[in-house]
Image (cartoon, grey):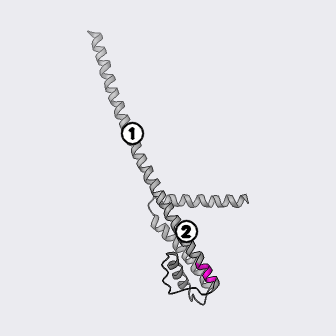
Amino acid sequence: MSSRHERVQKSDNRLRSRVQSVVASRRVFPFLAMVTVVFAVGIGILVRFIDHKDFHTVGDGVWWAVVTLGTVGYGDIVPHSAWGRFIGVIVIVFGITFLSFLMATVTSLFVASDQAANDAKAEARREASENETRALLRQILDRLDATEREGKSR
């Protein structure tokens, strides 16, 4: 049980890391497209073999999966068998849940990435301000030293 939990945790960490790197590099669209295509092709192949009467080719299965994932539902290809409809329910629930969750995650990572960039800019401005303050203090101290030396020499 714990080794399964550890594998799931490692897989989750890899996925999270991958999503974060994709967001940081601003390559989100290709990532989302790839995940959707892989899922649609997998479901298309599965539904072709489960319900071959309604899905004459793998292409029909992929088309149906994409249309169903996108919640468009044209109705040009529809599963009629119980297993085909069961897969349809899974695709609908997964499509809505997965894409909504993925979009929310990506959005929050964009916000976090932008916040980190803003924080870095604010830190750079703060450091610049501190450096300017230090430089002014050095000038004041130098003038004070010069004034004291001038006062002692009189």
State whether the magenta stretch is mostly helix, strand or loop.
Answer: helix
Residue sitting at the far right = 1
Q: Is residue 84 or residue 136 the one in the foreground?
A: 84
The quadrant the N terminus occupies is bottom right
The percent coordinates of residue 119 (x first, y second) are 43, 46
Q: Which residue is mark 1?
A: 126
Residue drawn at the location 49% of the way across and 62% of the way down: 104
Callout 2: few (<14), some (14-19), or many (20+) C-alpha neighbours within 10 Å? few
The quadrant the C terminus occupies is top left
Circles 2 and 1, Cβ within 8 Å, touching? The answer is no
What secondary structure is marked by label 2?
helix
Q: Which residue is mark 2?
A: 97
The percent coordinates of residue 71 (x first, y second) are 50, 76
Tell me the quarter of the picture where residue 15 sits: bottom right
How far apart marks 2 and 1 lie (CA) works out to 42 Å
Highlighted magenta segment, given as a residue range: 83-88
The percent coordinates of residue 5 (x first, y second) are 68, 59
